[in-house]
Amino acid sequence: MSVLLGLACLGALVFIPLLIGVVIYNGLVSLRNRVENAWAQIDVQLKRRHDLIPNLVETVKGYAAHEKETLDAVIQARSAAMAGEASGSPAQSAQAEGVLTGALKSLFALSESYPDLKANQNFLQLQEELTSTEDRIAYSRQFYNDEVRKFNTKIQTVPSNIIAGIGNFKVKEYFEVPEGEKDVVDVKFD
Amino acid sequence: MYEQIASNKRRTFVVLFCFIVLIALAGTAFNYVIGYGVAGVIVAIAIAISMSFFSYFYSDKVALMASRAVPADEVQYKRFHNLVEGLCIASGLPKPRLYVVQDSSPNAFATGRNPEHAAIAVTTGLLEIMNRVELEGVIAHELSHIKNYDILVSTIAVTAVGAITLLSDIGIRTAFWTGGRSRDNRDNSGLGSILALVGIAFLVLAPFAAMLMNFAVSRNREYLADATGVSLTRYPPGLISALEKLQDDKSVVHSATKATASMWIEQPLPGKEGGGQEKWLDKKFNTHPPLQDRIKRLKEM
């Protein structure tokens, strides 16, 4: 009887920590997947922005073709951003996206002096789309950082840090705003 | 935050349980006044239980219908859709269904049983007077209600309160008009009349109990939802300026009722002004903390 009891105790001593370990490990994997998914979401939004730009440039051309400089800057920034994304380097991509954001801002600032353009339904729609896409880019970066923070906290705190060490989970890097994007021009909504 | 979610889920069960008990008691009292006996009580309890199941699955539709909300058109209300989609990315929530209430008074509410089955409704007045950042603040507040599972508790309370109010209204009217038929039975008159008194007391108390329950689930969560909302937009001035606009606006949402009052971002019904005790009591029954307090807390952040 007492032998059986002892065996049961021993079994529980081995089994329960193992079970806890498995639960923590699975939790870490799902957190890491969420971080990766959050990163992929940023790319989805960036691509959306790249897709909207040619339409915008065409629309503006119809009203302000002679503002070639600004239009060219936007087109160039877009190509650079797409190349940055293709290079797979987050830092380079972020830098190019920052330049694109600046170029778009000057394009919208320029549109202020063309009443016909500002009244164009297509232009207004594109402006709304691009504004909300920029919001989404910012939000998806914010969400990515939130997820990274959760993941990093998990793998640095007891007891999950033990499992993280065994399972070789590495601390993820935060997304940092590139230098060029930090000094944001004051934009008027409405 | 996670504690809040857990406590909201727990509270839902408490609310549902209280709801069943209240409905059963009110039903019993109702029954006693008209006088149907044990069978009637069982029927009342059965109705109470099935109603709480119904309210778990359908209360959002009831709340939306009661407020006369119609689905928001994707093209016509593009900005509304865009803002919600952006904030959903920030919060990691699925996009809720969006509704519009044709009303010039600015207000908004969220409903549903979980983030996968959620809806946000705004009045056309809100869409008109708020600029982009303000609207974003309001939507972030509503999404926070969804994220914190406030919607589950409040929406179920809406259905429960509505049902209890209805039942006791019917009870009081019937008791009044029939003069309490149980008195005619004259069996063990002593016990009978005591029970009749208790029954009438329940009928009178039921709306109060319901109102208190409604109140219990709604006030502190507004502060919390403001805070969570701001953690999504990372821009307190947006929500502050939106709340200030709501403060300046004194109009009333026409389709709001006592039952649905606690759902909205701002108290949709006119508040009563009074002095002393009356004011204290009014304060107890207010579904929302005063807007000045909410603005003050946001400014302190």
Image (cartoon, rainbow, N blue to C red):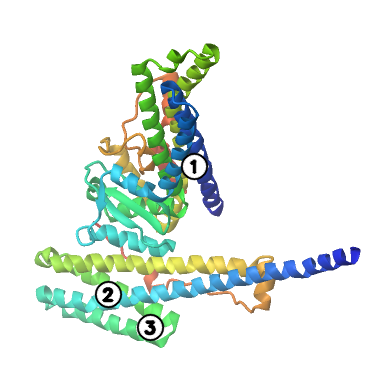
Q: Which class describes the residues within 10 Å of circle 1: few (<14), some (14-19), or many (20+)?
A: many
Residue A109 falls left or right of residue A66 = right
> For residue A103, which numbered disc appears in the image?
2
Q: CA distance from mark 1 to mark 3?
A: 52 Å
Q: Earlier in the sequence, mark 3 or mark 2?
A: 3
Q: Secondary structure at mark 3?
A: helix
Q: Does residue B159 sit above or below B70 in this rendering?
A: above
Q: In the rendered structure, the residue with mark 3 lies on which chain?
A: A
Q: CA distance from mark 3 to mark 2?
A: 17 Å
Residue B38: image x %, image y %?
Answer: 50, 29
Residue type, mark 2 in image: Ala
Q: Residue at x 51, y 16 (%)?
A: B192
For the question of whether residue B54 can be seen, the reply is yes
Between disc 1 and disc 2, the foreground one is 1
Q: Quadrant of residue B88?
A: bottom left
Q: Residue at x 60, y 71 (%)?
A: A26
Q: In this rendering, do the residues under marks 1 and 2 share a single chain?
A: no
For the question of whether residue B284 can be seen, the reply is no
Residue type, mark 1 in image: Leu
Q: Residue at x 54, y 14 (%)?
A: B188
Q: CA distance from mark 1 to mark 2?
A: 56 Å
**Which residue was labeled with disc 1?**
B16
Q: Which class describes the residues within 10 Å of circle 3: few (<14), some (14-19), or many (20+)?
A: many
Q: Secondary structure at mark 1?
A: helix
> For residue B203, which numbered disc appears in the image?
none
Q: Quadrant of residue A5?
A: bottom right
Q: Secondary structure at mark 2?
A: helix
Q: Residue furthest right?
A: A2
Between disc 3 and disc 2, the foreground one is 3
Residue B72 falls left or right of residue B140 = left
Residue A112: image x %, image y %?
Answer: 17, 64
**Which residue was labeled with disc 3?**
A85
